[in-house]
Amino acid sequence: MPEFRFRAHMSKAVRVRDVIIGGGAPVVVQGMTKTDTRNVKATLDEIYRYVDVGCEIVRVAVPDHEAAEAVKEIVAHSPIPVVADIHFDYRLALEVIKAGVDKLRLNPGNIGGRDRVEQVVRAAKERMIPIRIGVNSGSIEKNLLHDYGRTAETLVKSAESHIQILNDLDYDNIVVSLKASDVPTMVAAYRLMAKTYDYPLHLGVTEAGTLFQGTIKSAIGIGTLLAEGIGDTIRVSLTAPGEEEIRVAWEILKSLKLRDRGANIVACPTCGRLQFDMWPVTNELERRLATIAEPITVAVMGCAVNGPGEAREADVGLAGGKNMGLIFRHGEIVRRVDQKDMVEELWKEILDAAEEVRAG
Ligand code: SF4
């Protein structure tokens, strides 16, 4: 079977609290909160919801002093590492480092002169906090934009200028992202970066858009790179609740067989041979399966042509007949169910299969 687990880009490892990014570690799923960081309770509630769907590192925006103060409590109660997103103000970086944040996302060229960057780097070094240099096609330095345009090479040049500032201060605990809303530009930028540097790469398509379009852009941009063995951590950016971003991120990793989490649904597209009302069954199952973390495969097939074959391969399967279905467990027919009972009967088997996985 073809594998995507090889790494074309061998990055070095960076530790973020207890999570390793790069160095051949499993690709890490990140999210970013959408609440006002100053509201500690709402932000923590959102983090817990993210954790439930598989978020492994969370980023919070730190736009002002009050948000920086809130970071202390957020870090103290967050079950996963917290990254502070800082723009322009080096004092906020110093504050969140003191508050115990696990990683910074900032561009050293944007926080003032050498003296200010030095203070931040010294504090980050003392606490062994990594810095992600986050280049974004929407905010590239004006001089680079003027000289080279909005291209993949420009994104890399921008990253290089920030890396140089940190390297000059003998700081190397770096992760890099080169996000663009244009998928070919983003893919080309990461490929270029991976040729020259061994910093772990944080992949993302920025401002990808709404749930439907953004999911496709992210899957293609991030998925292309991961399939080439480039990328150590991913964040899907959608104009949608953050939980959706994390679910999409996991589906990308699962599709490439890079990570395993939750149910994999195998379902036929249906056609003129369909024997029962299948869409309500698969829609309801998809909704319920979002709560299952165990890696199980559930197959729902519309008729006898491919149905029994696929259903047999799955942990739990349903092969449709005339207004009824046959339920399979690990290849064996366990019972026949009427259309009206399909969801509930399948759900019982799914919970049982999940329990089996948990029990080992
Ligand atoms: Fe059509 Fe049956 Fe194939 Fe589903 S399994 S697409 S109903 S032939």
Image (cartoon, rainbow, N blue to C red):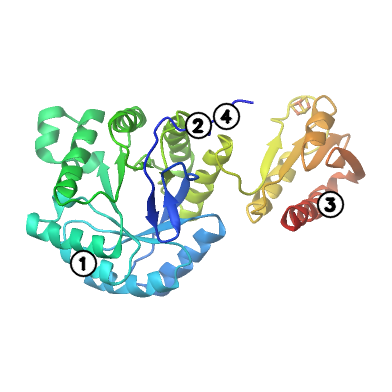
Horizontal placement of 80 versus 324: left or right? left
What secondary structure is found at the residue carrying circle 4? loop
Label 3 sits on residue: 345
Residue 246 in percent (x, y) is at 49, 50
First reached walking from the N terminus: tag 2 or tag 1: 2
Tell me: is circle 1 under 8 Å from ligand 1.
Answer: no
Label 4 sits on residue: 3
Q: Mark 2–mark 3 contact, CB under 8 Å?
A: no
First reached walking from the N terminus: tag 1 or tag 4: 4
Residue drawn at 17 percent across, 66 percent down: 91
Q: Mark 2–mark 4 contact, CB under 8 Å?
A: yes
Determine if residue 241 is in view: no
Task: Determine the CA span between mark 2 and mark 1.
Answer: 38 Å
Residue 316 in percent (x, y) is at 79, 44
Task: Determine the CA span between mark 3 and mark 4.
Answer: 35 Å
Residue drawn at 54 percent across, 45 percent down: 250
Name the kind of residue labelled 3 in the image: Glu
Label 2 CA crowd tier, 10 Å (few <14, some 14–19, many 20+):
some
Residue drawn at 16 percent across, 41 percent down: 161
Q: Nearer the viewer, mark 2 or mark 3?
A: 2
Label 2 sits on residue: 6
What secondary structure is found at the residue carrying circle 1? helix
